[in-house]
Image (tube, helix red, strand yellow):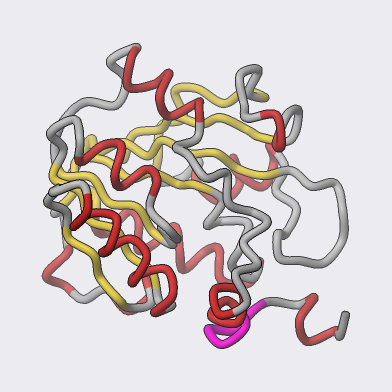
Amino acid sequence: MSDEVRNGYEQADWQKHYDEQDLSWDLDHVAPPFVRLFEDHIINPGNLIVPGCGQGHEVIFFAERGFQVTGVDYTSGAVGLLRRSLKNKNLNARVLHQNFFDLDDNHNRAYDSLLEQTFFCAIRPDERAAYVDIVSRILKPGGMLAGLFYETGEKGGPPFNTTEDHIRDHFGEVFDIERLEKCTFSDEKRRDKEWLAVMRKK
């Protein structure tokens, strides 16, 4: 694999995966930790946004349960699949075909919660600070980030390795980290590699 790809994907690289139906990262269902957080009443109904939502299993799961969900993805492949699934299930959710980093001021303080589902590990490490700034900007005061962060233990990416220190260093100044632990109930494909985080915007 070329150094350019190892240093981060562009939109065309992600779209190629959809064109070739090579979605090896996709679980084909909502991530079990998010189901547990919902069942435990940690993620509560409201305005929820999912950056880099892909096929949108989380979007569908929470839309089915009465959340006002916004999914964001910049590949037409992901957006097309999600919109088709929503239509087939007769569900309402907003699907934005755009780069998460381009969200304008209309999104400021618009969301009660955000699901971080391996998006942080998919972007280049030098984009992480900007990502945290946007998340802070679009969440309401006291808004929650519920996240699954992927620790690969490997160099390069995507996915780019994410450690506990990475999470605390990037989020600690603007979020109160209420929970951060190696997840014990991940999907088998991600067992022992996920950090489960629950944090509130200060």
Quarter of the picture holding the C terminus: top left
Is 34 magenta? The answer is no
Q: Position of residue 97 (x, y in %)?
A: 30, 76
Residue 132 versus residue 41: which sits nearer the camera?
A: 41
Residue 91 versus residue 182: which sits nearer the camera?
A: 91
The residue drawn where x is 56% and y is 30% is 196
Residue found at the very far front of the displayed protein: 88
The residue drawn where x is 44% and y is 62% is 52
Vertical placement of residue 46 versus 1, above or below: above
Q: Position of residue 162 (x, y in %)?
A: 70, 48
Dominant secondary structure of the residues highlighted in magenta in the image: helix
The residue drawn where x is 50% and y is 35% is 31
Vertical placement of residue 32 versus 143, above or below: above
Vertical placement of residue 149 versus 12, above or below: above
- Residues rendered magenta in the picture: 9-13
- Please give left or right for residue 59 compared with residue 132 in the image: left
The residue drawn where x is 52% and y is 57% is 119
